[in-house]
Amino acid sequence: MGADLEQRLVDLETRLAFQEHALAELSDALAAAREEAARTALALHRVLEELQQTRATLAAHPYTPDPSQEPPPPHY
């Protein structure tokens, strides 16, 4: 094998190793992003459930303050 051909083979192997490493890093980053998106979706789902429960509670028991407990208007 000639020196030129051997150098080309070394270059190709180096490039392949770099690409494999980059692909592994991208795969890890994608997996982390998917996990974060799943956690965010779960948190949003929980917040929406809490909001629905709060709305249902307020609809069932609306807050109506006792007028006698209100302070007098400032002009009195």
Image: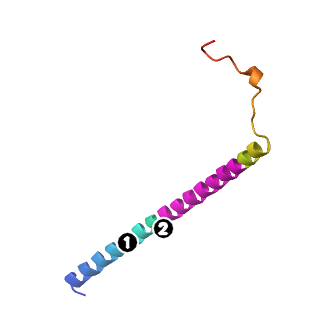
Describe the element under mark 2 as helix, strand or loop.
helix
Task: Residue 66: give x, y in percent of width and height.
Answer: 77, 26
Task: Examine the rendered structure and indicate whether residue 68 appears above or below residue 33.
Answer: above
Q: Along the line of sight, which residue is nearer the eye, 58 or 2?
A: 58
Locate residue 64: give its quadrant: top right
Task: Examine the rendered structure and indicate whether residue 8 appears above or below residue 39.
Answer: below
Q: Earlier in the sequence, mark 2 or mark 1?
A: 1
75 sits to left or right of 15 = right
Residue occupied by mark 1: 19
Q: The N terminus lies in which quarter of the figure?
A: bottom left
Q: Along the line of sight, which residue is nearer the eye, 51 or 26?
A: 51
- Crowding at label 2, few (<14), some or many (≥20) Cα neighbours within 10 Å? few
Task: Examine the rendered structure and indicate whether residue 28 appears above or below residue 13.
Answer: above
Identified by mark 2, the residue type is: Ser
8 sits to left or right of 32 = left
- Label of residue 27 in the image: 2
Task: Examine the rendered structure and indicate whether residue 38 appears above or below residue 55.
Answer: below
Task: Residue 45: give x, y in percent of width and height.
Answer: 65, 55
Residue at the image point whose x is 62% and y is 53% from the top: 44
Task: Residue 35: give x, y in percent of width and height.
Answer: 57, 60
Farthest-out residue, top: 76
Farthest-out residue, bottom: 1
Identified by mark 1, the residue type is: Gln
Residue at the image point whose x is 43% and y is 70% from the top: 23
* Magenta stretch, residue numbers: 28-52
Query: Is the magenta region chiefly helix, strand or loop?
Result: helix
Q: Along the line of sight, which residue is nearer the eye, 67 or 58?
A: 67
The mark closer to the camera, 2 or 1, is 2
- Crowding at label 1, few (<14), some or many (≥20) Cα neighbours within 10 Å? few
Describe the element under mark 1 as helix, strand or loop.
helix
Farthest-out residue, right: 60
